[in-house]
Image (cartoon, helix red, strand yellow):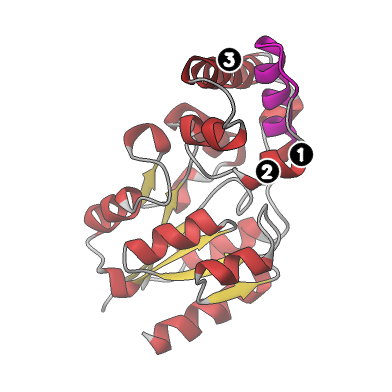
Amino acid sequence: MTRRLVVFDVDGTLVDSQRIILASMDAAFAAIRRARPEDAAVLAIVGLSLPEAMAALAPELEAAEHAALVEGYRASFVAARAAGRAEAVAPLYPGARAALERLAARPDTLLGVATGKARPGLDHLMRAHDLGRFFATSQTADAHPSKPHPSMLVAALAETGCAPDAAVMVGDTEFDVAMGRAAGLATVGVAWGYHPRTRLEAAGADVVIEDFAALDAALERLRGRR
């Protein structure tokens, strides 16, 4: 039996993390006495690793200010977790857990994660939602180049022994789609996250779905196509 690997992005795909992202950006920009960009601009760079995200979000700033933004963001995020604030645990999107349970129950399917989060942030989220048991591999930004570099997916394939043509990347941003394509995977864009359908389609998503209920059929369609 040939196993397939389905790799999920996290922020904007499995969980709606915009509340903690925006709060941490508020703190980061306040710390260097700069105005934070609008919400839409912040959410548009979700998925990139923090250094790349800050450079894209505020290209007019110097490297030292980008570094300060990264540290301010991380410090705010860590403080929120340590204080047990509600926004530190982003809620799952409707249907996410049920979709993971369905797919994980299939003997021909392995699940993975490829996220712009650092390992401590992902581990915290996994514990909070009891998600770790679903995933055979998890790749984080602190061990790899930023999306859309394919390094995270190359590592996920190596860990699971799956071939690129038996794997799918599922994500909400053009960075996820571009990463999947760069690694030779089929790609599913999800329209409930932080990039609109038009950006996902322009990036080359094989399929774009509107809710988790449509995921299983999309995966089967891609399996048949490949």
Q: Which mark is residue 39?
A: 1
Q: Nearer the viewer, residue 167 or 177?
A: 177
Q: Nearer the viewer, residue 169 or 162?
A: 169
Task: Check contact, mark 1 vs mark 2: CB within 8 A.
Answer: yes
**Is 65 covered by the magenta stretch?**
no
Which of the two discs, 3 and 2, labels the residue nearer the N terminus? 2
Q: Is residue 109 above or below residue 117?
A: below
Query: Left or right: 218 with respect to 12?
Result: left
Q: Which mark is residue 43?
A: 2
Q: Is residue 8 above or below residue 15?
A: below
Taken as a whole, is the magenta stretch helix, strand or loop?
A: helix
- Quadrant hosting residue 145: top left
- Mark 3: give few (<14), some (14-19) or many (20+) Cα within 10 Å: some
Whole-angstrom CA distance, mark 3 to mark 2, is: 19 Å
Residue at image position (68%, 19%) is: 29
Residue at image position (45%, 82%) is: 222
Whole-angstrom CA distance, mark 1 to mark 3, is: 20 Å
- Mark 2: give few (<14), some (14-19) or many (20+) Cα within 10 Å: many
Query: Left or right: 158 with respect to 144?
Result: left
Which of the two discs, 1 and 3, labels the residue nearer the N terminus? 1
Disc 2 marks which amino acid? Leu
| Residue marked by disc 3 | 75
Q: What residue span does the magenta drawing correspond to?
A: 19-35
